[in-house]
Structures are given as C-alpha cells and as structure tokens.
Amino acid sequence: MKYKNIWENVLNPLELNEDNRGKIVDVFYNENINHVAVINSKPNVVRGNHYHKLTTQHILITKGSLTYWYKEYNSENYAKSVELFEGDFVSTPPLEIHALKIGNIENQFVVFSSGLR
C-alpha cells in the first residue's frame, strides 16, 4: 500500500499550481489507467474486503473519510489500517487484501484501476 495526500509534498513530475482562482494538482503522469469509477457510500458501511489478482487500484477520497484496512494475500500478519480524508490517495497493488470502512458521514471516492479487473 502506498499513501499520500495529493495536496502535500507534490513530487516531480507531478505539479501543483496555485493562483488567486484556486489550485490545480496532478494526480497521475504517464500512467496506464484502464478504468475509472466514482463511488458514493452511505455512512458506516464496509466496501471491498477482497483482493485483485492482476489489478493495481488507486483510490482518491473526494468527500468524507474512511478507514482503509490492508494486508498481503496469504500473510499471517494482522491487517494494518490508515485513516483517509479528503485529498488522501492510496494505491493497492495486486494480491493485497483491502477493506474500506466508511466514516460517520456519506463518503465519495474515485477509483482508478490499472490492469485486468
């Protein structure tokens, strides 16, 4: 799992531009994205709780919050978790089990997928 906030510590070749009208930030550069979906979730529900054999999945939180649980497939270790809020971005590689527990208010996130779904 890779985690970052898209508005903080923007690394080259990505750019963050800001002026009196607001901000524009790059999310991807030169990436092969095969599918994009917007997901709206009701409060306190669980999504995911699965893994992908060949797909890398990127999630960008656009509203609300969630707890992201993850662990490597076939690992005997306990799952780890991270709290995600608006602007947070997490990447899930193939063979990583992941589950999303939505926070106390409605939530929205965008999923970008690379590879076979």
Image: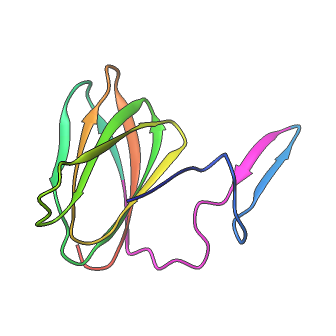
Give residue 30's position: percent from left, percent from top.
59, 79
Q: Residue furthest right?
A: 20
Give residue 113's position: percent from left, percent from top.
36, 68
Segment tinted magenta in the rendering: 21-37
Q: Is 21 drawn above or below residue 44 in the view shown?
A: below
22 falls in the magenta region: yes
**Looking at the rendering, which quadrant does residue 111 occupy?**
bottom left
Which quadrant: the C terminus? bottom left
Give residue 53's position: percent from left, percent from top.
18, 75
Q: Is 35 drawn above or below residue 77 in the view shown?
A: below
Closer to the camera in the image, 17 or 2? 2
Which residue appears at 51% of the width and 36% of the height? 86
Closer to the camera in the image, 5 or 30? 5
Which residue appears at 32% of the width and 26% of the height? 103
Give residue 44's position: percent from left, percent from top.
22, 25
Which quadrant: the N terminus? bottom left
**Looking at the rendering, which quadrant does residue 95 occupy?**
bottom left
**Looking at the rendering, which quadrant does residue 43 occupy?**
top left
Which residue appears at 75% of the width and 44% of the height? 23
Q: Is residue 117 left or right of residue 56?
A: left
Closer to the camera in the image, 42 or 58? 58
83 falls in the magenta region: no
Colour approach in the figure: rainbow
